[in-house]
Image: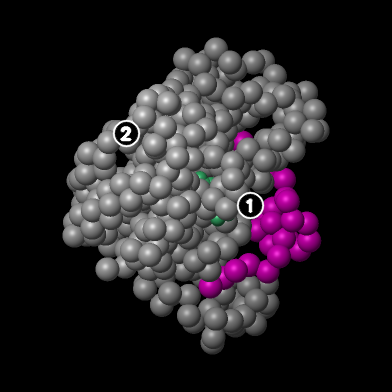
Amino acid sequence: MRIYADNAATTKMSPAAIEAMLPFLSEDFGNPSGLYTAGQKAKEALEDARERVARCINASPRQIIFTSGGSESDNQAILTAAAMGEKAGKRHILSEPMEHHAVLHTLKALEKRGFTVEYLPVSAAGLVKASDLERMLRDDTCLVTVMAANNEIGTLQPIEEIGAICRKRGVLFHTDAVQAVGHIPLDVDSARIDLLSASAHKFHGPKGTGFLYAGSNVRLEPLIHGGAQERGKRAGTENVAGIVAMTVALEEAVANREAIAARLIPLRDRLIRGLSAIPHAALNGDPEKRLPSNVNFCFEGIEGESLLLWLDEAGIAASSGSACTSGSLDPSHVLLAIGRPHDVAHGSLRLSLGEETTQEEVDYLIEAVTKAVAYLRGFSPVWRELQNGDRTYIL
Ligand SMILES: *Cc1c(COP(=O)(O)O)cnc(C)c1O
């Protein structure tokens, strides 16, 4: 059996989305800036896509610009809010420590330019609290950036509460919603979101395509200077085929969201129950406020990397955290932020289910992971120390 359990890293494209993009790679290949028919057809497709994408998050078309994906949208959102803050003499930003590196590293760059960035505390389940936000907001805060759903542990943050507080205090609110769009309900208006980042390849669209929503109170600063595409907010010939495919994938994801969640949640919880039976293992993240697709565990006395290699041999594609963290020896910053010690954080496994995941696959995952953990512990010096009492169990 081959099982793809890394849907948080990327998803397989929807067949309807592939179908929709094909004409724009062949007969309708024209440049949307062209005045001839093929160009005008591309232009119409682009504006139709903008309207449909906007509708999916309850925005208006003028509030959407198309980007190359989540990282670019995060960068542009944060740098825009910083530029607006700077003009008003406000150089304080609030975030939380479990953000994606596209957010964290942009904030680091701003610190070098003289901004002060503070991070909200997070609970052991990975949640921020509205009361901490109220307390830590300052008169010179220009931006609050908190992700809607965490890509490693699946935790859903209280974005409606955060949005309401920010709106009341006149502070811009950005949310990295890359894991949330198409997977949980999202309404930029009712959640009072000023800036929202999304990426197509996390909801069965193509890689290298995404969008950024900016409320009417925000003047987007371009990251890419050049032509007048995207009303001057993002230069460069538009990725028409990608944008059209993203739109179809997003509409599909939104239309099927409830049905998929209703099917995935019991499968997710079955997987969590199955893996919880492994001794000295613990679920990471909140058991309820979590993405329908996300399962993330720490297993004491093993290395996440060896677990992944063992699982790959068994036909299972999984991840130890985010794709960007694996390959480096540092444990996940998310697991450290929720208080997992280094040793334990190294033994982590993320299984992210997709709409095609079956119960049979979940049962195979439970069996394979249980076997792998027992096998790898047999070779682990740390596990031997734990068993001999030379080291104390944490989980
Ligand atoms: C994948 C991801 C990103 C980056 O998106 P790209 O389109 O790959 O640049 C940003 N934030 C989160 C939460 C993600 O999961």
Q: Which mark is residue 280?
A: 2
Query: Which residue is at 69% across, 53% downward?
Result: 233
Q: Nearer the viewer, residue 274 or 31?
A: 274
For numbered disc 1, what is the local secondary structure?
A: helix
Query: Which residue is at 26% across, 40% downward?
Result: 278
Asked whether residue 352 appears in the rendered view, the answer is yes
Crowding at mark 1 (Cα within 10 Å: few <14, some 14-19, many 20+) = many
Percent position of residue 342, x then y: 52, 33
Q: In the current view of this chain or complex, which residue is farthest to the right?
A: 113
Q: In the current view of this chain or complex, which residue is farthest to the top?
A: 135
Q: Is residue 251 above or below residue 222?
A: below
Q: Quadrant of residue 143?
A: top right
Q: Nearer the viewer, residue 255 or 119?
A: 119
Give the residue type that dot 1 points to. Answer: Glu
Instruction: Please state which of the two labelled residues, at mark 1 or mark 2, is closer to the viewer.
Output: 2
Percent position of residue 155, x then y: 40, 36
Secondary structure predominantly adopted by residues drawn in magenta: loop
Q: Is residue 94 above or below residue 150?
A: above
Query: What residue range appears in magenta?
Result: 217-241
Q: Which residue is mark 1?
A: 72
Q: Quadrant of residue 82?
A: top right
